[in-house]
């Protein structure tokens, strides 16, 4: 993250400009954003290729983005950086001729594995929030244990827990949702462990999957025409690309099924994804179905759908080159590979996979038990601040009440 900061500082020094942090407003589209800032929609959207245009629909509300402003003329925008995923960001900048340009560049980020233990006085959720100030940490803990333990019955005052998790940083601030890698909770004398497998699902001590949320394929008998990638360098176009979903090629009109039960949180048209449905499921999961020809009758926002229910039909609406379903899966706002999660039954690891799991488990166990023994305290993250990396020595720093994201 340091080089980026240096880069900004250098720019600031040369052009007398400064960086400001903002939070992406919910319900503001990228086009509305350009309009609000008086930036040219033609250069920064309509003249882009389809893939770049589609990417602008991946900006999440609440994400922190940065604007570099000219000190002499604070309305003059020099650069903008907007993260679209954990790995790629949109970079808008003024070239030598003063013309605004659009590119996607990797996010310079770092990861740290962190750990802490705590004594439960009230409930795991309440005490994690109280101790860490982070609802995110409490949420990932509760989501992981939801299907294997009932905290309402089993927890007594004085029970302890330990969490091992990964935190990403961008521009030296916590970024994206933390990922729970392994954890243990003592209920009375019994310890209950959980481990994140390399398929991004949680397993108990015996290698049995504990999550209750299972997805089915949203379409029958379709072939995969494009796979999931978070960040890929395109050697011909000389650009970074991301494909935050899976494309299934199918005949126009082929029924699309809800991959899991849940509530429809979006059913409408967007320029990039065409006719689009988003369904919110349990445990922080969200699925997305794009380019539909039409929705099934009665399918609308707010409606609850069951797993397997037909919600719409394959089409080629929006920025699409032929009939296909673009299927996206997100957990806590972060895109994940749907093909790694789609399955029909709860898994029990066996054979080679079980052996690999046991090795992973051994490392985590050692670490967790050590943290329990040492009573490792939680160390607070720096709060997200509205920093002003200005040349002006009197520049002030004001705190942003927003949660880091
Ligand atoms: Zn796609």
Image (tube, rainbow, N blue to C red):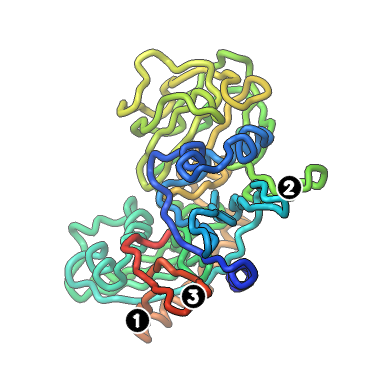
- Screen quadrant of the C terminus: bottom left
Q: Nearer the viewer, residue 267 or 57?
A: 57
Tell me if 119 is positioned left or right of 362 in this view: left
Residue 192: give x, y in percent of width and height: 35, 66
Indicate the secondary structure of the residue bearing disc 2.
strand
| Residue 195 in view | no
Q: Residue at x 57, y 24 (%)?
A: 318
Q: Which residue is mark 3?
A: 392
- Which badge, 1 or 2, is on the more N-terminal residue? 2
The label on residue 377 is 1
The answer to whether the residue labelled 1 contacts the one labelled 2, judged by CB atoms less than 8 Å apart, is no
> Between marks 1 and 3, how big is the CA–CA gap?
39 Å
- Screen quadrant of the N terminus: bottom right
> Between marks 2 and 3, how big is the CA–CA gap?
36 Å
- Neighbourhood count class around disc 3 (C-alpha, 10 Å): few under 14, some 14–19, many 20 upward: few
Q: Which residue is mark 2?
A: 239
Say which of marks 1 and 2 sits in front.
Answer: 2
């Amino acid at each position: 993250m340091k080089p980026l900061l240096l880069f900004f500082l250098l720019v600031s020094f040369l052009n007398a400009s400064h960086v400001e942090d903002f939070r992406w407003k919910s319900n503001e589209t990228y086009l509305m954003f350009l309009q609000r800032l008086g930036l040219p929609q033609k250069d920064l959207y309509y003249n882009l290729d389809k893939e770049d245009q589609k990417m602008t629909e991946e900006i999440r509300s609440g994400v922190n983005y940065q604007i570099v402003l000219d000190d002499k003329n604070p309305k003059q925008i020099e650069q903008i950086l907007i993260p679209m995923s954990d790995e790629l960001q949109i970079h808008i900048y003024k070239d030598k001729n003063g013309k605004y340009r659009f590119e996607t560049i990797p996010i310079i980020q770092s990861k740290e594995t962190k750990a802490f233990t705590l004594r439960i006085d009230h409930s795991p959720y309440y005490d994690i929030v109280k101790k860490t100030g982070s609802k995110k940490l409490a949420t990932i803990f509760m989501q992981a244990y939801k299907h294997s333990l009932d905290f309402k019955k089993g927890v007594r005052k004085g029970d302890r827990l330990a969490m091992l998790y990964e935190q990403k940083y961008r521009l030296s601030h916590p970024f994206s949702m933390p990922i729970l890698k392994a954890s243990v909770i003592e209920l009375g004398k019994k310890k209950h462990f959980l481990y994140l497998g390399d398929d991004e699902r949680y397993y108990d001590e015996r290698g049995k999957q504990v999550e209750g949320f299972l997805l089915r394929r949203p379409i029958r008998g379709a072939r995969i025409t494009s796979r999931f990638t978070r960040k890929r360098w395109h050697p011909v176009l000389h650009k970074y690309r991301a494909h935050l979903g899976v494309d299934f090629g199918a005949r126009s009109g082929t029924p699309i099924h809800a991959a899991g039960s849940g509530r429809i949180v979006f059913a409408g048209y967007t320029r990039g994804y065409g006719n689009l449905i988003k369904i919110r499921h349990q445990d922080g999961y969200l699925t997305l179905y794009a380019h539909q020809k039409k929705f099934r009758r009665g399918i609308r926002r707010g409606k609850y759908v069951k797993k397997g229910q037909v919600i719409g039909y394959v089409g080629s609406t929006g920025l699409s080159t032929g009939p296909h379903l673009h299927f996206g899966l997100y957990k806590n706002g972060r895109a994940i590979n749907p093909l790694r999660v789609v399955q029909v039954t709860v898994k029990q690891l066996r054979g080679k996979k079980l052996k690999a799991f046991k090795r992973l488990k051994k490392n985590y166990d050692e670490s967790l038990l050590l943290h329990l023994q040492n009573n490792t305290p939680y160390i607070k993250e720096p709060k997200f601040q509205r920093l002003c990396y200005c040349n002006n020595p009197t520049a002030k720093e004001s705190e942003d009440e927003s949660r880091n994201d």
